[in-house]
Image (cartoon, helix red, strand yellow):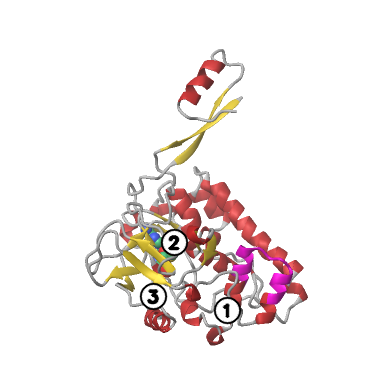
Amino acid sequence: MAEASRVLQTTLIPSFHPQHRSPIFQSLPLNFRRNPIQCTVSTSNSTKATVPQKIPWGCESDSLENASALQKWLTDSGLPPQKMALQKVEVGERGLVALKNIRKGEKLLFVPPSLFITADSEWTCGEAGKVLKQNGVPDWPFLATYLISEASSLESSRWSNYISALPRQPYSLLYWTREELDRYLEASQIRQRAIERVTNVVGTYNDLRLRIFSKYPALFPEEVFNIETFKWSFGILFSRLVRLPSLGGKVALVPWADMLNHCCEVDAFLDYDKSSQGVVFSTDVSYEPGEQVFISYGKKSNGELLLSYGFVPREGTNPRDSVELSLSISKSDKCYKEKLEALRKHGLSAY
Ligand SMILES: C[S@@+](CC[C@H](N)C(=O)[O-])C[C@H]1O[C@@H](n2cnc3c(N)ncnc32)[C@H](O)[C@@H]1O
């Protein structure tokens, strides 16, 4: 058997039929099919009674209640004056909106490194950070644990204003039940990747619990470090962590920059700018006051956007949307060689 896969320009995620919506979808506006589909479903009911069901920090995903405190803290912490403000928006619920005219090609943001959250950031609970380092915990689980630790430190954490403005439940496939993954992603290869992602997050948490948390219960109490808080922190990382090519691919949470929503039609990417020493992006379109400013999260299909960021762009607006199809040719096929050659001519790999 020779197999080849090809990326075709088509819609990846089957549309959600209102009759098949789970409770969260039922609360969406009636015109939800015209808007990007935001995807968060109920949390699992397998948690123990001692474990809190709701994350006690952060805010509702469309809430501006902590926005002014966030903006003040950012300014006090060295963020230069901005041409954008955090506001409610039509695409992405909250986002950055132009306050002044913004020219095409203009550099924006300038978030200084002192505001980045990385694996090198200082812990409010230094002992906990030391234990994770001693155990060689890799960046992602390290940062996920760091975020929970800082969130639970409340006002003592230097990130408290930032964490208070993060969504209490990020839009993420991590909150979908297995039944929902099976039902809504039935025809999509994203289904398998989503199942693997959920399994990895649960496995990572279990591994940390067995190897580290259970040995240091005073530093990592289960009421704080549990699967619900890990789903939250991984959901935040998946949807907000940026890779900075100019810093050797370092990953960081960059407060303020992470308030920018994605648009499939722009080509503007976050990166560290060595000359201004901050995270910036250059716009590739101009904006007038009141317009939402967008960046690109990458040239991703709808399925990939759903997998990482928990949303699907409005139907027909993603020129990068694609689906993988497997083609096969039987070796006993009389024209096996010719067909293989024809595939190769079209740039398709075969094995
Ligand atoms: C980096 S955050 C952007 C800021 C976010 N809107 C907020 O209020 O915190 C990424 C999240 O924003 C939302 N988002 C970004 N771009 C979007 C879009 N084009 N359509 C719908 N939601 C979007 C998704 O919930 C995604 O997980």
Q: Earlier in the sequence, mark 3 or mark 2?
A: 3
Which quarter of the frame holds ligand 1?
bottom left
Crowd around label 1: few <14 · some 14–19 · many ≥20 (10 Å):
many
Q: Percent x, y for residue 292?
A: 29, 65
Q: Which residue is mark 2?
A: 271
Q: CA distance from mark 1 to mark 2?
A: 25 Å
Q: Which residue is mark 3?
A: 63
Q: Which residue is mark 1?
A: 150
Give the residues drawn in magenta, as a range.
Answer: 130-145
Closer-to-camera residue (232/182): 232
Residue lying furthest bottom in this view?
156
Residue 28 visible within the image: no
Amino acid tagged 3 = Ser
Q: Percent x, y for residue 136?
A: 71, 66
Q: CA distance from mark 3 to mark 1?
A: 21 Å
Horizontally, residue 137 falls left or right of residue 94, namely right
**From the viewer's perspective, is residue 101 above or below residue 65?**
above
Q: Nearer the viewer, mark 3 or mark 2?
A: 2
Residue 237 part of the magenta segment: no
* C-beta proximity under 8 Å, tags 1 and 2: no
Horizontally, residue 168 falls left or right of residue 98, namely right
Q: Quadrant of the N terminus?
A: top right
Q: Earlier in the sequence, mark 1 or mark 2?
A: 1
